[in-house]
Every structure is written in structure tokens, then in C-alpha cells.
Image (cartoon, rainbow, N blue to C red):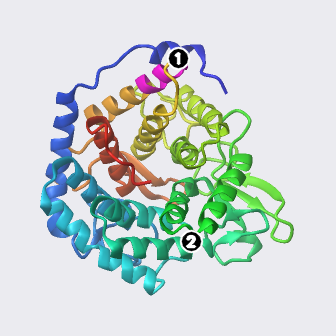
Amino acid sequence: MELNEKTVKRYSENVELSKEMLYRALHNALSKIDRNIEDFINLFPRPSSVNGIYPGISNGGEWDDWTSGFWTGILWLAYEITKEEKYKKVAAFQLKSYKERIEWKNAVDHHDLGFLYIPSVVANYKVTGSEEAKITAVMAAEHLTTRYREKGEFIQAWGELGNPDNHRLIIDCNLNIPLLFWASEITGNKKYYEIAEKHVNTAAQTVVREDGSTFHTYYFDVETGKPLKGSTAQGNSDDSAWARGQAWGIYGFPLAYKYLKDKKFIELYKKIVNYFLNKLPEDNVCYWDLFFDDNSGEEKDTSAAAIAVCGILEMSKNLKDDDSNKKIYMNAANHIMKSLIEKYTTKNDTRSNGLLKEAVYSKPHGTGVNECCIWGDYFYMEALVRFLKADWKVYW
């Protein structure tokens, strides 16, 4: 998929994200985070808000199977950009709950160990050098390897291992496998690296369609490992492109390139991001499925937009200055971020304890529609840090 003429023209135009705008956005975000610190020490925000307000849940509680790490990650980002000890203190305190969760195997029978342990525990290790954090994150990586399926060479997303109905991967796992690459670097154990490499190669061969759009999930034959079919669990249809899944591809394949240095991931990224940008509506913030446009009456998904910004910023480090698309991609990221800052934050909603409004967890399931979603808040905060702190060391 190439960028169409309209997209090229649209994003050839420079848009300035002034330091003043970014710092004002950061200030507004920190004011919400400061409020939340008192409520979310032993508890964590639920995956999506209810009428703009996150209820509290335990780490691994009824409502949470994959999202606790984003709140702790927000605290680490807040600490790194401000150096205020109050953020570090709470984030470090929460390590205990992550350690207990993996030791007790509490709500970890899924592939989302990266989402849980990278922004929370790996971040802790990278920021503080904590030995306890390192040991805990390696335990999580080890557990993630138990979901690797030799037949098909992928990490199974959900459900009972060996069940034909569950023998599948999902594109989201692109953000989980960095946990394995990191564990291999830290321990010297090549097993983690090899599993991660095999999974991302399988994903590259299956979930990305010829036109650059993506499947949410892909099934494999449980007996032979043969790829069977792509479908969706959270998109509009099996043939459409679920916006957050597309965004996981925009961020996930640059991370694969970071660790593997295989240029095919640069080309794959370009196909995926080109499709995404070609489908963006007038205000640059995507609808929850890329099938929809400004005439659809459907909801936006600001969380997908924030993830995409982070992915574009990550891959920009690897594109040569003479790459004709590099400037277009960066302009697009600036346009999206400017729209998020100006139109989609909760700065004028004093009730809300979220950062970004108008996100969607799962429209088909009627869950978290037109609400704040904690991963959207995290990636919005990460994008702010990326724009403001050029030497920030990526957690993923």
C-alpha cells in the first residue's frame, strides 16, 4: 500500500508542536496523575472508565487481565520527565503486587505479560537498576514462553492451550514479545530471543494483508500448524481493519526491527502506516475501525491514535533522512498529536480521572465505548515524553 495523493499532500504540510503546547499538555496530564496517586497505590485503574472515571481494581482482579502495567508505566514516565520522587515512590511500591502476581500465577494465563510487565517492572529495572524488578520480569518472560506453540511457531493469545478454537495469535502480541527480547539480553538465554523472533516472523507472514491492512487474529491448524484464516474479535468485521490492531502493527514492527535489525520490518511498517494514514478522517484521529469515516456516526479511538504516534516516532529513528516518506510520517504524527492535545484530553472535565477521552475498548462487546482507556492514557503520556525528552530510553 502506497500513500495516496491526498495523504501525501495533507502531510507534506508542516505542523508545529511547540514546546509550550507540549509542556502545557504535560502539565494538564500531571495534574490528573497527581489526583490519581492517592487512589491508585494498592489499587489500579480499571481498563476503561465508567462515565469518564476509572474505578479501582486489584492487580489481577476481576476486571483486569492485562492492563495494570499501564498505570505503573504512567508513573515511571511522570518520574522520568519531572524527577519528582512521589511518582517513583508509588511505582516502586507496586513492584510487590507484580511479583506476587507472577509467583502465584494470578490471571496470567494469556499472552499479555508484556503489557503487564514491561511498562511497570522492566521500566523499574531500566530506571532504578532494581535486582528484584529484573528477577520478577524474567519470571514473567519465562511464563510467557509456556504459551509458545511449536506447530505454527507463535505465542497463543488466549484460552486453553491445545484447544483448536484457541490456536491463534493476535496482532497485539507485537507489544508483548519485547519482554522476551529483553529477557534474552539480560540473561543470555537465547531461548527467549528465538521464540520472540519466530513469533514476530509468523505474525508478519499472516496478520498483514497485501494492501497493508491487518487482521486482528489469525488461526492455525492445531495438528499441523498450518495457517488457516484471519478474523477479528474486536473489529467491525473479519475483512476490516480494527484501528487499535493496526496501531499495534505500527508500533510493534518497529520494535521487531529494533531487536532483529531485519529491514523487512521497515517495509512492513511502511505498508501498515500508509494504510492507516490513508484512512484518517478530517481531524487526524481514527475511528475505532478504519472502515469508518466522518459520515459513519461511529466513535473515534484516541487510544489507537496515541499508539500510532509512538510507533511513528520509534521508527523515525531508523528511516534515513533522504527517505521521501520520513517527513510525511513525522508530520502525520505531529498532526495526530496536536489533535489529541487540542480536542481529546480531559483537561476541561474536572470529574474525569483519565487523560484521553473518546477511546474504545471493544465496540462489538459494548465495553469501554467512548470512554478513557488506561493504555490510551499511557501511550499519550509516552508520546509526550518522546516529544519532550529526546534521550528517553524506551521501555519496550
Disc number placed over residue 336 in the picture, else none: none
Q: Nearer the viewer, residue 48 or 37?
A: 37
Q: Is residue 329 magenta?
A: yes
Are dots 2 and 1 in contact, CB under 8 Å?
no
Residue 244 appears anywhere in the view: yes
Question: Vertical placement of 16 versus 306: above or below?
Answer: above
In x, y percent, where is residue 306? 40, 42
Q: Residue furthest right?
A: 224
For label 1, the residue is 322
Q: Nearer the viewer, residue 236 or 13?
A: 13
Disc number placed over residue 144 in the picture, else none: 2
Where, quadrant-wise, is the N terminus in this rendering?
Answer: top right
Look at 61% across and 72% down and name the residue there.
145
Which range is magenta? Answer: 322-331
The first of marks 2 and 1 along the sequence is: 2
In x, y percent, where is residue 388? 26, 36
Look at 41% across and 75% down and name the residue there.
136
In x, y percent, where is residue 75? 25, 59
What SS does tag 2 mark? helix
Amino acid at the residue labelled 2: Leu
In x, y percent, where is residue 368? 41, 57
Amino acid at the residue labelled 1: Asp
Q: Main secondary structure of the magenta part?
A: helix
Q: Is residue 233 magenta?
A: no
Look at 64% across and 41% down and name the residue there.
262
Residue 52 appears anywhere in the view: no
